Protein backbone atom coordinates (compact mmCIF):
# COMPACT_ATOMS: atom_id res chain seq x y z
CA UNK A 1 0.00 0.00 0.00
CA UNK A 2 1.30 3.43 -0.92
CA UNK A 3 0.85 6.12 1.69
CA UNK A 4 1.15 9.82 0.94
CA UNK A 5 1.73 12.42 3.58
CA UNK A 6 0.34 15.91 3.60
CA UNK A 7 3.88 17.16 4.03
CA UNK A 8 4.55 16.71 0.35
CA UNK A 9 1.45 18.51 -0.93
CA UNK A 10 -0.53 21.69 -0.62
CA UNK A 11 -3.38 21.43 1.92
CA UNK A 12 -6.56 20.27 0.17
CA UNK A 13 -9.20 21.33 2.71
CA UNK A 14 -9.48 23.10 6.02
CA UNK A 15 -9.32 19.90 8.00
CA UNK A 16 -5.69 19.48 6.96
CA UNK A 17 -3.12 21.34 8.97
CA UNK A 18 0.63 21.23 9.06
CA UNK A 19 2.16 21.28 12.48
CA UNK A 20 3.94 18.00 13.06
CA UNK A 21 4.98 17.77 9.43
CA UNK A 22 5.67 21.47 8.99
CA UNK A 23 9.41 21.04 8.38
CA UNK A 24 8.60 19.23 5.13
CA UNK A 25 9.32 15.73 3.88
CA UNK A 26 12.33 13.86 5.28
CA UNK A 27 13.36 16.86 7.39
CA UNK A 28 16.97 16.64 8.59
CA UNK A 29 18.22 18.39 11.72
CA UNK A 30 19.12 21.61 9.90
CA UNK A 31 15.64 21.94 8.36
CA UNK A 32 14.04 20.96 11.66
CA UNK A 33 15.91 23.76 13.44
CA UNK A 34 15.18 26.23 10.65
CA UNK A 35 11.44 25.52 10.97
CA UNK A 36 11.01 25.10 14.72
CA UNK A 37 14.04 26.88 16.20
CA UNK A 38 16.58 25.71 18.76
CA UNK A 39 15.32 23.84 21.78
CA UNK A 40 16.64 23.32 25.32
CA UNK A 41 14.81 20.44 27.08
CA UNK A 42 16.28 21.33 30.48
CA UNK A 43 14.94 24.89 30.24
CA UNK A 44 11.47 23.62 29.29
CA UNK A 45 11.36 20.89 31.98
CA UNK A 46 10.20 22.88 35.05
CA UNK A 47 7.02 24.10 33.28
CA UNK A 48 6.37 21.12 31.04
CA UNK A 49 3.89 19.13 33.15
CA UNK A 50 1.79 22.23 33.83
CA UNK A 51 1.80 23.12 30.13
CA UNK A 52 0.82 19.58 29.18
CA UNK A 53 -2.06 19.64 31.65
CA UNK A 54 -3.24 23.01 30.33
CA UNK A 55 -2.90 21.83 26.74
CA UNK A 56 -5.29 18.90 27.15
CA UNK A 57 -2.99 16.67 25.06
CA UNK A 58 -4.10 13.04 25.12
CA UNK A 59 -2.06 10.04 24.04
CA UNK A 60 -2.14 9.34 20.31
CA UNK A 61 -1.23 5.65 20.52
CA UNK A 62 -4.67 4.22 21.26
CA UNK A 63 -5.84 4.47 24.84
CA UNK A 64 -5.97 8.27 24.87
CA UNK A 65 -4.84 8.90 28.45
CA UNK A 66 -4.02 12.47 29.45
CA UNK A 67 -0.36 12.90 28.53
CA UNK A 68 0.47 14.94 31.63
CA UNK A 69 -0.93 12.29 33.99
CA UNK A 70 1.42 9.60 32.69
CA UNK A 71 4.35 12.00 33.02
CA UNK A 72 3.33 13.02 36.53
CA UNK A 73 2.91 9.40 37.65
CA UNK A 74 6.45 8.59 36.53
CA UNK A 75 7.88 11.77 38.02
CA UNK A 76 6.18 11.00 41.34
CA UNK A 77 7.23 7.33 41.50
CA UNK A 78 9.09 6.40 44.65
CA UNK A 79 12.83 6.80 44.27
CA UNK A 80 14.03 5.07 47.36
CA UNK A 81 16.22 2.54 45.57
CA UNK A 82 18.70 2.44 42.68
CA UNK A 83 15.95 0.67 40.69
CA UNK A 84 14.13 3.96 40.64
CA UNK A 85 16.32 5.23 37.80
CA UNK A 86 13.57 6.43 35.49
CA UNK A 87 13.04 5.35 31.92
CA UNK A 88 11.27 7.03 29.00
CA UNK A 89 10.28 5.04 25.93
CA UNK A 90 8.99 6.44 22.63
CA UNK A 91 6.71 3.83 21.11
CA UNK A 92 6.55 3.88 17.32
CA UNK A 93 5.45 0.26 16.80
CA UNK A 94 2.38 0.14 14.59
CA UNK A 95 0.86 -3.28 14.99
CA UNK A 96 -2.34 -2.20 13.26
CA UNK A 97 -2.09 -3.49 9.69
CA UNK A 98 -3.44 -0.27 8.13
CA UNK A 99 -1.72 2.25 10.37
CA UNK A 100 1.09 4.28 8.83
CA UNK A 101 0.98 7.47 10.91
CA UNK A 102 3.94 6.69 13.17
CA UNK A 103 6.08 5.51 10.27
CA UNK A 104 5.17 8.70 8.39
CA UNK A 105 6.01 10.85 11.40
CA UNK A 106 9.34 9.11 12.03
CA UNK A 107 10.36 9.39 8.40
CA UNK A 108 9.44 13.05 8.08
CA UNK A 109 9.82 14.55 11.54
CA UNK A 110 12.09 12.31 13.66
CA UNK A 111 13.67 15.32 15.37
CA UNK A 112 10.34 16.49 16.74
CA UNK A 113 9.89 13.04 18.31
CA UNK A 114 13.40 13.24 19.77
CA UNK A 115 12.71 16.74 21.13
CA UNK A 116 9.62 15.37 22.88
CA UNK A 117 11.51 12.38 24.23
CA UNK A 118 14.27 14.62 25.64
CA UNK A 119 11.75 17.09 27.07
CA UNK A 120 9.69 14.34 28.76
CA UNK A 121 12.87 12.74 30.14
CA UNK A 122 14.05 16.07 31.57
CA UNK A 123 10.61 16.71 33.12
CA UNK A 124 10.30 13.34 34.87
CA UNK A 125 14.01 12.99 35.73
CA UNK A 126 14.68 10.01 33.46
CA UNK A 127 18.19 8.95 32.54
CA UNK A 128 17.42 5.99 30.26
CA UNK A 129 15.84 6.82 26.92
CA UNK A 130 14.57 4.47 24.21
CA UNK A 131 12.97 4.78 20.81
CA UNK A 132 11.16 1.62 19.74
CA UNK A 133 9.78 1.25 16.23
CA UNK A 134 9.19 -1.12 13.35
CA UNK A 135 11.52 -1.51 10.41
CA UNK A 136 10.03 1.25 8.20
CA UNK A 137 10.91 4.03 10.66
CA UNK A 138 14.15 2.66 12.05
CA UNK A 139 16.65 4.06 9.58
CA UNK A 140 15.17 7.56 9.97
CA UNK A 141 15.53 7.28 13.75
CA UNK A 142 19.12 6.05 13.53
CA UNK A 143 19.97 8.88 11.13
CA UNK A 144 18.31 11.52 13.29
CA UNK A 145 19.91 10.31 16.53
CA UNK A 146 23.34 10.35 14.87
CA UNK A 147 22.80 13.93 13.61
CA UNK A 148 22.55 15.57 17.02
CA UNK A 149 24.86 15.71 20.02
CA UNK A 150 22.00 15.33 22.51
CA UNK A 151 20.88 12.09 20.84
CA UNK A 152 23.92 10.13 21.97
CA UNK A 153 22.18 8.56 24.97
CA UNK A 154 19.09 7.38 23.09
CA UNK A 155 18.91 3.64 22.50
CA UNK A 156 17.04 2.47 19.43
CA UNK A 157 15.21 -0.87 19.52
CA UNK A 158 13.52 -2.63 16.61
CA UNK A 159 9.88 -3.68 17.02
CA UNK A 160 8.58 -6.91 15.55
CA UNK A 161 5.92 -6.73 12.85
CA UNK A 162 3.09 -8.18 14.95
CA UNK A 163 -0.26 -6.77 16.03
CA UNK A 164 0.68 -6.79 19.72
CA UNK A 165 4.25 -5.48 19.44
CA UNK A 166 3.12 -1.96 20.36
CA UNK A 167 1.03 -2.97 23.39
CA UNK A 168 2.57 -1.20 26.39
CA UNK A 169 3.74 -4.20 28.40
CA UNK A 170 4.86 -5.95 25.20
CA UNK A 171 7.08 -2.95 24.42
CA UNK A 172 8.71 -3.18 27.83
CA UNK A 173 9.16 -6.95 27.45
CA UNK A 174 10.60 -6.56 23.95
CA UNK A 175 13.23 -4.08 25.11
CA UNK A 176 14.10 -6.15 28.19
CA UNK A 177 14.03 -9.65 26.69
CA UNK A 178 13.63 -9.36 22.93
CA UNK A 179 10.18 -11.01 23.16
CA UNK A 180 7.30 -8.62 22.36
CA UNK A 181 4.72 -10.38 24.53
CA UNK A 182 2.23 -8.65 26.81
CA UNK A 183 2.55 -9.48 30.48
CA UNK A 184 0.22 -9.54 33.43
CA UNK A 185 -0.36 -6.00 34.66
CA UNK A 186 1.11 -6.65 38.12
CA UNK A 187 1.77 -2.95 38.56
CA UNK A 188 1.71 0.29 36.67
CA UNK A 189 4.60 0.94 34.31
CA UNK A 190 5.04 4.28 36.07
CA UNK A 191 5.86 2.33 39.24
CA UNK A 192 7.49 -0.77 37.83
CA UNK A 193 8.22 -0.87 34.13
CA UNK A 194 11.44 -1.69 32.30
CA UNK A 195 13.53 -3.90 34.62
CA UNK A 196 11.36 -2.74 37.52
CA UNK A 197 12.10 0.93 37.00
CA UNK A 198 9.53 3.73 36.84
CA UNK A 199 8.80 3.95 33.14
CA UNK A 200 7.03 6.54 31.01
CA UNK A 201 5.85 5.15 27.69
CA UNK A 202 4.39 7.52 25.13
CA UNK A 203 3.47 7.01 21.52
CA UNK A 204 5.88 8.83 19.17
CA UNK A 205 3.13 11.17 17.92
CA UNK A 206 2.37 12.11 21.53
CA UNK A 207 6.08 12.88 21.99
CA UNK A 208 6.14 15.04 18.86
CA UNK A 209 3.24 17.10 20.25
CA UNK A 210 5.14 17.34 23.55
CA UNK A 211 8.13 18.64 21.60
CA UNK A 212 5.94 21.44 20.21
CA UNK A 213 4.16 22.21 23.50
CA UNK A 214 7.52 22.40 25.27
CA UNK A 215 8.53 25.07 22.73
CA UNK A 216 5.34 27.04 22.19
CA UNK A 217 3.12 26.30 25.20
CA UNK A 218 -0.42 25.12 25.88
CA UNK A 219 -2.23 28.13 24.37
CA UNK A 220 -0.51 27.60 21.05
CA UNK A 221 -1.51 23.92 21.10
CA UNK A 222 -5.13 24.83 21.82
CA UNK A 223 -5.23 27.31 18.96
CA UNK A 224 -6.00 24.30 16.74
CA UNK A 225 -8.87 21.87 17.28
CA UNK A 226 -11.80 22.30 19.65
CA UNK A 227 -12.05 22.89 23.39
CA UNK A 228 -12.93 19.22 23.91
CA UNK A 229 -10.37 17.89 21.44
CA UNK A 230 -7.53 20.40 21.22
CA UNK A 231 -4.55 20.31 18.87
CA UNK A 232 -4.11 18.14 15.83
CA UNK A 233 -3.84 14.42 15.21
CA UNK A 234 -2.40 12.21 12.50
CA UNK A 235 -4.93 9.98 10.79
CA UNK A 236 -4.36 7.07 8.44
CA UNK A 237 -7.22 6.85 5.94
CA UNK A 238 -7.30 3.43 4.28
CA UNK A 239 -9.60 0.87 2.74
CA UNK A 240 -11.89 1.88 -0.13
CA UNK A 241 -10.34 5.26 -0.82
CA UNK A 242 -8.47 6.32 -3.98
CA UNK A 243 -5.15 6.31 -2.11
CA UNK A 244 -4.36 5.34 1.46
CA UNK A 245 -2.94 8.45 3.11
CA UNK A 246 -1.72 9.92 6.36
CA UNK A 247 -3.26 13.31 7.07
CA UNK A 248 -2.76 15.75 9.93
CA UNK A 249 -6.17 17.13 10.91
CA UNK A 250 -7.64 19.48 13.50
CA UNK A 251 -8.98 17.93 16.67
CA UNK A 252 -12.74 17.61 16.27
CA UNK A 253 -12.59 17.29 12.46
CA UNK A 254 -15.63 15.50 11.04
CA UNK A 255 -15.04 12.01 9.75
CA UNK A 256 -16.69 12.72 6.39
CA UNK A 257 -14.49 15.79 5.94
CA UNK A 258 -11.37 13.73 6.64
CA UNK A 259 -12.51 11.12 4.12
CA UNK A 260 -13.12 13.83 1.51
CA UNK A 261 -9.70 15.30 2.22
CA UNK A 262 -8.29 11.86 1.43
CA UNK A 263 -10.06 11.92 -1.92
CA UNK A 264 -12.92 9.62 -0.97
CA UNK A 265 -16.57 10.18 -1.90
CA UNK A 266 -18.48 9.80 1.42
CA UNK A 267 -21.68 9.01 -0.51
CA UNK A 268 -20.01 5.82 -1.78
CA UNK A 269 -19.04 4.68 1.70
CA UNK A 270 -21.34 2.42 3.69
CA UNK A 271 -19.37 2.19 6.94
CA UNK A 272 -16.07 3.21 8.51
CA UNK A 273 -14.10 1.29 11.09
CA UNK A 274 -12.83 3.98 13.47
CA UNK A 275 -9.71 3.54 15.58
CA UNK A 276 -8.35 0.35 14.03
CA UNK A 277 -9.01 -3.35 14.48
CA UNK A 278 -9.90 -2.87 18.15
CA UNK A 279 -12.24 -0.06 17.18
CA UNK A 280 -15.91 0.24 16.26
CA UNK A 281 -17.94 0.67 13.07
CA UNK A 282 -19.85 3.83 12.19
CA UNK A 283 -22.53 3.75 9.50
CA UNK A 284 -22.84 6.14 6.54
CA UNK A 285 -25.38 8.33 8.35
CA UNK A 286 -22.99 8.73 11.30
CA UNK A 287 -20.03 10.05 9.29
CA UNK A 288 -20.80 13.66 10.26
CA UNK A 289 -19.48 12.72 13.71
CA UNK A 290 -16.29 14.38 14.88
CA UNK A 291 -13.19 12.21 15.16
CA UNK A 292 -12.88 13.04 18.85
CA UNK A 293 -13.15 10.91 22.00
CA UNK A 294 -16.19 12.82 23.24
CA UNK A 295 -18.17 12.67 19.99
CA UNK A 296 -17.40 9.00 19.38
CA UNK A 297 -18.31 7.74 22.85
CA UNK A 298 -22.04 7.26 22.08
CA UNK A 299 -21.02 4.84 19.32
CA UNK A 300 -18.64 2.89 21.55
CA UNK A 301 -15.79 4.21 19.43
CA UNK A 302 -12.59 6.17 20.05
CA UNK A 303 -10.01 7.75 17.72
CA UNK A 304 -7.59 5.05 18.94
CA UNK A 305 -4.43 5.11 16.86
CA UNK A 306 -6.07 7.43 14.32
CA UNK A 307 -7.22 4.93 11.72
CA UNK A 308 -10.23 5.26 9.43
CA UNK A 309 -10.89 2.13 7.39
CA UNK A 310 -13.55 2.95 4.79
CA UNK A 311 -15.89 0.36 3.27
CA UNK A 312 -17.37 0.98 -0.14
CA UNK A 313 -21.09 0.20 -0.58
CA UNK A 314 -20.22 -2.84 -2.66
CA UNK A 315 -17.94 -4.48 -0.09
CA UNK A 316 -19.46 -7.00 2.29
CA UNK A 317 -19.17 -5.70 5.85
CA UNK A 318 -19.90 -9.08 7.42
CA UNK A 319 -17.16 -10.81 5.44
CA UNK A 320 -14.74 -7.94 6.20
CA UNK A 321 -15.46 -8.17 9.92
CA UNK A 322 -15.05 -11.96 9.83
CA UNK A 323 -11.64 -11.57 8.19
CA UNK A 324 -10.50 -9.00 10.75
CA UNK A 325 -11.59 -11.13 13.71
CA UNK A 326 -9.92 -14.16 12.16
CA UNK A 327 -6.72 -12.10 11.89
CA UNK A 328 -7.00 -10.90 15.49
CA UNK A 329 -7.55 -14.45 16.75
CA UNK A 330 -4.32 -15.44 14.99
CA UNK A 331 -2.37 -12.53 16.50
CA UNK A 332 -2.87 -13.33 20.17
CA UNK A 333 0.12 -14.29 22.26
CA UNK A 334 -1.70 -17.52 23.23
CA UNK A 335 -0.83 -17.06 26.89
CA UNK A 336 -4.31 -16.74 28.36
CA UNK A 337 -7.55 -18.72 28.13
CA UNK A 338 -9.62 -16.07 26.33
CA UNK A 339 -7.07 -15.92 23.53
CA UNK A 340 -6.31 -19.65 23.41
CA UNK A 341 -9.95 -20.75 23.24
CA UNK A 342 -12.30 -17.78 23.11
CA UNK A 343 -10.96 -15.81 20.13
CA UNK A 344 -10.73 -18.83 17.79
CA UNK A 345 -14.33 -19.68 18.71
CA UNK A 346 -15.39 -16.07 18.10
CA UNK A 347 -13.61 -16.12 14.74
CA UNK A 348 -15.42 -19.35 13.86
CA UNK A 349 -18.78 -17.83 14.76
CA UNK A 350 -18.05 -14.88 12.44
CA UNK A 351 -17.10 -17.27 9.64
CA UNK A 352 -20.54 -18.84 10.15
CA UNK A 353 -22.21 -15.43 10.05
CA UNK A 354 -20.41 -14.55 6.83
CA UNK A 355 -21.16 -17.92 5.25
CA UNK A 356 -24.85 -17.45 6.00
CA UNK A 357 -27.20 -20.38 6.35
CA UNK A 358 -26.08 -22.79 9.08
CA UNK A 359 -28.05 -26.06 8.74
CA UNK A 360 -30.52 -26.45 11.60
CA UNK A 361 -29.72 -23.08 13.17
CA UNK A 362 -32.65 -21.01 14.45
CA UNK A 363 -32.94 -17.32 13.49
CA UNK A 364 -30.67 -15.26 15.71
CA UNK A 365 -28.75 -18.29 16.97
CA UNK A 366 -25.45 -17.48 15.24
CA UNK A 367 -25.43 -13.79 16.28
CA UNK A 368 -26.36 -14.83 19.82
CA UNK A 369 -23.34 -17.13 19.90
CA UNK A 370 -21.08 -14.27 18.77
CA UNK A 371 -22.54 -11.99 21.50
CA UNK A 372 -22.00 -14.71 24.12
CA UNK A 373 -18.42 -15.38 23.06
CA UNK A 374 -17.57 -11.66 23.08
CA UNK A 375 -18.91 -11.42 26.64
CA UNK A 376 -16.95 -14.53 27.64
CA UNK A 377 -13.54 -13.16 26.57
CA UNK A 378 -14.03 -9.54 27.61
CA UNK A 379 -11.82 -8.45 30.51
CA UNK A 380 -10.38 -11.91 31.07
CA UNK A 381 -6.97 -11.64 29.41
CA UNK A 382 -3.69 -10.38 30.78
CA UNK A 383 -3.87 -7.58 28.23
CA UNK A 384 -6.70 -5.83 26.39
CA UNK A 385 -6.48 -7.85 23.18
CA UNK A 386 -9.61 -9.92 23.92
CA UNK A 387 -11.47 -6.77 25.05
CA UNK A 388 -10.64 -4.94 21.83
CA UNK A 389 -11.67 -7.91 19.71
CA UNK A 390 -14.92 -8.22 21.67
CA UNK A 391 -15.57 -4.49 21.13
CA UNK A 392 -15.20 -4.87 17.37
CA UNK A 393 -17.45 -7.94 17.34
CA UNK A 394 -20.23 -6.25 19.33
CA UNK A 395 -20.04 -3.14 17.20
CA UNK A 396 -20.37 -5.18 13.98
CA UNK A 397 -23.26 -7.23 15.41
CA UNK A 398 -25.11 -3.98 16.18
CA UNK A 399 -24.28 -2.04 13.03
CA UNK A 400 -24.60 -4.89 10.52
CA UNK A 401 -27.60 -6.70 12.01
CA UNK A 402 -29.57 -6.33 8.76
CA UNK A 403 -26.63 -7.59 6.69
CA UNK A 404 -26.24 -10.59 9.00
CA UNK A 405 -29.93 -11.43 8.63
CA UNK A 406 -29.61 -11.26 4.85
CA UNK A 407 -26.63 -13.59 4.98
CA UNK A 408 -28.74 -16.04 6.95
CA UNK A 409 -31.18 -15.96 4.06
CA UNK A 410 -28.36 -16.66 1.63
CA UNK A 411 -28.15 -13.09 0.30
CA UNK A 412 -25.79 -10.16 0.75
CA UNK A 413 -27.16 -6.62 0.84
CA UNK A 414 -23.99 -5.30 -0.76
CA UNK A 415 -24.37 -7.38 -3.89
CA UNK A 416 -27.30 -5.14 -4.92
CA UNK A 417 -25.10 -2.02 -5.26
S1 LIG B 1 -4.90 -11.68 26.64
FE1 LIG B 1 -4.23 -12.73 24.77
S2 LIG B 1 -2.83 -11.31 23.79
FE2 LIG B 1 -3.10 -10.60 25.89
S3 LIG B 1 -1.44 -11.57 27.05
FE3 LIG B 1 -3.16 -12.99 27.19
S4 LIG B 1 -2.91 -14.38 25.44
FE4 LIG B 1 -1.59 -12.62 25.08
Image (cartoon, grey):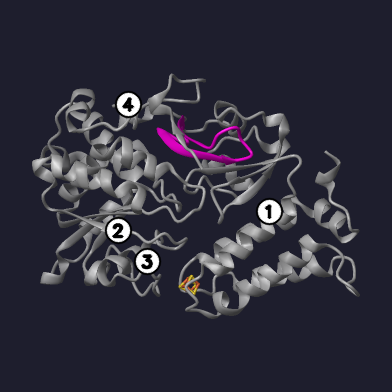
Q: What separation in Å lies between label 3 and label 4 (alpha carbons)?
A: 32 Å
Q: Do callouts 4 and 2 mark residues in contact (Cβ within 8 Å)?
A: no
Residue ID for mark 2: 158
Q: What separation in Å lies between label 3 and label 1 (alpha carbons)?
A: 27 Å
Q: In terms of secondary structure, where does tag 4 sit?
A: loop
Residue mark closest to the camera, 3 vs 1: 1
Give the side of residue 327 with respect to residue 29, left or right. Answer: right
Q: What separation in Å lies between label 4 and label 1 (alpha carbons)?
A: 36 Å
Q: Nearer the viewer, residue 217 or 245?
A: 245
Answer yes or no: disc 4 within 8 Å of ligand 1: no
Q: Residue at x 22, y 71 (%)?
A: 195
Residue 170 badge: 3
Answer yes or no: disc 3 within 8 Å of ligand 1: no
Label 3: few (<14), some (14–19) or many (≥20) C-alpha neighbours in 10 Å: many
Residue mark closest to the camera, 4 vs 2: 2
Q: Quadrant of the C terminus?
A: top right
Q: What separation in Å lies between label 2 and label 3 (alpha carbons)?
A: 13 Å
Query: Is residue 213 part of the magenta span, yes or no?
Result: no
Q: In terms of secondary structure, where does tag 2 sit?
A: strand
Label 1: few (<14), some (14–19) or many (≥20) C-alpha neighbours in 10 Å: some
Mark closest to the chain's N terminus, 3 or 4: 4
Q: Nearer the viewer, residue 50 or 201?
A: 201
Q: Residue at x 38, y 27 (%)?
A: 7
Residue ID for mark 4: 22
The segment highlighted magenta reads 227-250
Residue 320 badge: 1
Give the side of residue 271 with respect to residue 74, left or right. Answer: right
Q: Position of residue 29 (x, y in %)?
A: 18, 33
Query: Is residue 239 part of the magenta span, yes or no?
Result: yes
Mark closest to the chain's N terminus, 1 or 2: 2
Amino acid sequence: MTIETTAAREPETRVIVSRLLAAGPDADFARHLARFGAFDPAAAAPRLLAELEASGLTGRGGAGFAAWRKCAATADARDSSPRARRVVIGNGAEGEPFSRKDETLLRNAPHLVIDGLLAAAAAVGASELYLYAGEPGLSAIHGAVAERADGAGIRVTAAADTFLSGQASAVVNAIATGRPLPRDPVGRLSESGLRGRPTLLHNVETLAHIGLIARYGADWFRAAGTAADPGTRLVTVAGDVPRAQVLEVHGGARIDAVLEAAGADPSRISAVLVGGYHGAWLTADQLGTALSPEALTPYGAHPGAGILLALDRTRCAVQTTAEIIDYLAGQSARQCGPCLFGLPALAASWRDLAAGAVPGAAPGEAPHRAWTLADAVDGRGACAHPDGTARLSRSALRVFAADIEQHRNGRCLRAAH
